Amino acid sequence: MHTSDAVAFWDSVYAARPATADKPNPNVLLTETVPDLPPGDALDLGCGNGGDALWLAGQGWHVTATDISAVAVERLAALARAHGLSEHITAVRHDLHRSFPASPAGGFGLVSAHYLHTPFHLDRATVLRSAAYALRPGGRLLVVDHGSTAPWSWNQDPDIRYPSPREVAAGIALDPETWTVERADAPRRIATGPGGRTAEVTDHVLLIRRTA
């Protein structure tokens, strides 16, 4: 499928969700992981509704937030302005299959990739490897993937298989002398979807630190 198909698909996904002046909720595993890290420059890959970028900015991070959907990017920029966080958030559109956001001098202190799944072609290993290389020494790459299918997910393929965090780490193929896996597990939680519907879901969590 072509890039134009992916753009149209994700624009339609976000356009179907009502715009709101409220801050979208951040992902739980981000809020559990980041408080122990000193604020700096962060990269949000696949920013979606913008909850993670807004939360990080509220914690003092300077966030580059990117998504393939112009609808998502424009909504995030508007929310950042509405909440007085424009100086902390740069929202930019990228098709990660073709381009990757530029790193600040010294690299990012955090790259967050939450649920970077798509029905279109995306070489995730290459994207996540680029993310790891964009870290400064001591910076973290946090990858949170679906480990199960929520009832409200856009992907209801019963045959889908979600790679484990260790499989994702192996696919990125980073030099262990430069990057260390700090966490690789599959916690379960009760998630809340559209309309307040709840369900137990499994997340696949991978946290990698650049050591040199």
Image (spheres, rainbow, N blue to C red):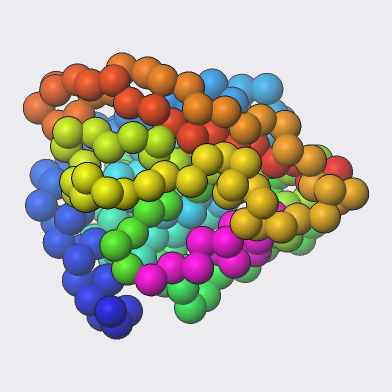
Write the residue at 45% across / 41% down: 145
Write the residue at 59% across / 47% down: 167
141 with respect to 200 (left or right) = right
Query: Which residue is farthest top?
Result: 190
41 with respect to 143 (left or right) = right
Write the residue at 70% across / 41% down: 208
Q: Is residue 123 magenta?
A: yes
x%, y% of residue 148?
A: 33, 35
Query: Does residue 84 sit above or below 183 in this rendering?
Result: below
Task: State the quadrant of the N terminus.
Answer: bottom left
Image quadrant assignment for residue 37:
top right
36 with respect to 106 (left or right) = left
Q: Is residue 177 visible?
A: yes
x%, y% of residue 173?
A: 71, 57
Q: Nearer the viewer, residue 128 or 38?
A: 128
- Write the start and end of the magenta stretch as one range: 121-132
Write the residue at 19% across / 20% down: 198
Q: Nearer the viewer, residue 132 or 61?
A: 132
Q: Nearer the viewer, residue 11 or 24?
A: 11
x%, y% of residue 152?
A: 16, 37
Q: Main secondary structure of the magenta part?
A: helix
| Number of numbered callouts drawn | 0
Query: Does residue 158 sit above or below 187 in this rendering?
Result: below
Query: Does residue 177 sit above or below 4 in this rendering?
Result: above
Q: Is residue 63 visible?
A: no
Q: Nearer the viewer, residue 57 or 32?
A: 32
Image quadrant assignment for residue 84:
top left
x%, y% of residue 120?
A: 32, 68
Image quadrant assignment for residue 102:
bottom right
Q: Is residue 197 magenta?
A: no
